[in-house]
Amino acid sequence: MTDVVIRAENLSKLYRIGELQLRTTLRESIVAAARGALRPSARRPAETVWALKDVSFEIGRGEVVGIIGRNGAGKSTLLKVLARITEPTSGRAEVRGRVGSLLEVGTGFHSELTGRENIFLSGAILGMRRAEIVRRFDEIVAFAEVERFVDTPVKHYSTGMYLRLAFAVAAHLEPEILLVDEVLAVGDAAFQKKCLGKMGDVSRQGRTVLFVSHNLAAVRYLCPSTLWLEGGGVHLHGPSEAVVREYLESTTAGGTALWTAEAGANDDRRASLLRVAVTDEGGRVAEMVGSDRPFFVEIDYRLADRVEGVRVGYRLQTPDGLVVFTSADTDPDGWGTDRGPGVLRSRCVFPGKLLNGGRYLLSVGCDVPMREILFFHEAVAAFNVQVSGSAGGAIPDGRLGLLRPSLDWSVAPVADTDRGSHARAGELEGDDAARR
């Protein structure tokens, strides 16, 4: 590949979990010595996790590359290594050009500085001259919609303001390479649309973009090629359409209408998903549901502590990544509620006569709107819809599309006076055409 700006060669990153807990205070050491043995206490065997393992790839100048994979696949770790936030355990990564990154809310901001000062600080870190920053300053502030608060310390900003300004700085200060993590998912819908539009503009300007996201539709729209990470390694790198399709097929190959977490999994997390089930009207798990009958999606989850403003929801999509719609247990307003601690169940009713025949996937998440994502599981469950009265999900009435709603219609004869009005309207249109 010519004009390579990012090259990874056998890139690996090892993390150690549960390091030995040693007595470190003088008092503890003296007590241990008095007992005749100065030895470690509360020993726990150290565990190692390869967040990245022998990752190799090349990205050329001006490429826009999506990075996808399950939770824990190494996506965020890869961006942190490329952004020089963390050092690899082995291997090497070459990055040629100025790098702008948005890996978490407010990356690189100093909370005591104002919005104005942080814009200039971020630009200086990127190696830009003051004149360049001044030239883009008004555009950055307008995009972030913080004109009134630009001279206020950012520690007083809401999470939404913080995020808007962070993205505006990362995208507008013209880095040659832009790294964007799933952080965009904490914004509202209008902000996400605005950011995706700006990323499209950046890519058309010939700058290189690496975009980590669970929003596969956005990846397919923005990124001609995609890198699929699995277990810390590169599983596939190629055209986005093919990679996303194969990724979804793999995640749902054994996907069923009932998913349960392994015992003890994520017990130490603030929020964790325990169970997802698609059930019929009798409460039974249903791999196949009829198109004209209601069914239900049940989401069980644990909150370790009381969480303010939390919500749980799902994304319904097709096996090829097309999002049908999203819904949350705080609809219609969308803002979260205070709940927990404990195990809770959020239950959604799917009305009959809504979905057309076919296979559908459920991705389930929990977040605090505009602040943080507590968990997200891609394509965690799957189910099939069969058109009622048909075999194998065929469409006997010729209805196309993902939805088949039963809408109210009326049929009535048109009155003579109405027919006369239509005729006169046609004559007038004919006269107008003749005059033109």
Image (cartoon, rainbow, N blue to C red):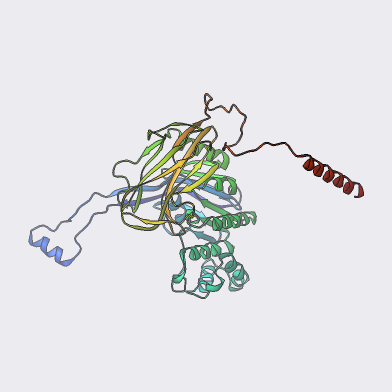
* Quarter of the rendering containing residue 368: bottom left
Residue 292 position (above or below residue 121): above
Location of residue 419 with respect to 113 vertically, above or below: above
Whether residue 278 sits left or right of residue 191 in the image: it is left
Q: Residue furthest bottom?
A: 151
Residue at 88% across, 49% down? 432
Q: Residue at x 60, y 57 (%)?
A: 198
- The x, y position of residue 100, in whole percent, is 53, 61
Give whichever of 148, 176 is nearer the camera.
148
Quick check: 175 above or below 407?
below
Q: Which residue reaches farthest front? A: 416
Residue 379: x and y in percent read: 45, 41
- Residue 230 placement, left or right of 210: left
Front position in the image: 423 or 212: 423
On the question of residue 387 being in view, the answer is yes
Residue 359: image x %, image y %?
50, 34
Image coords of residue 168 (percent x, y): 55, 63
Extreme residue in the right direction = 435
Residue at the outermost top position: 391
Q: Is residue 233 visible?
A: no
- Tell me: 121 left or right of 17: right
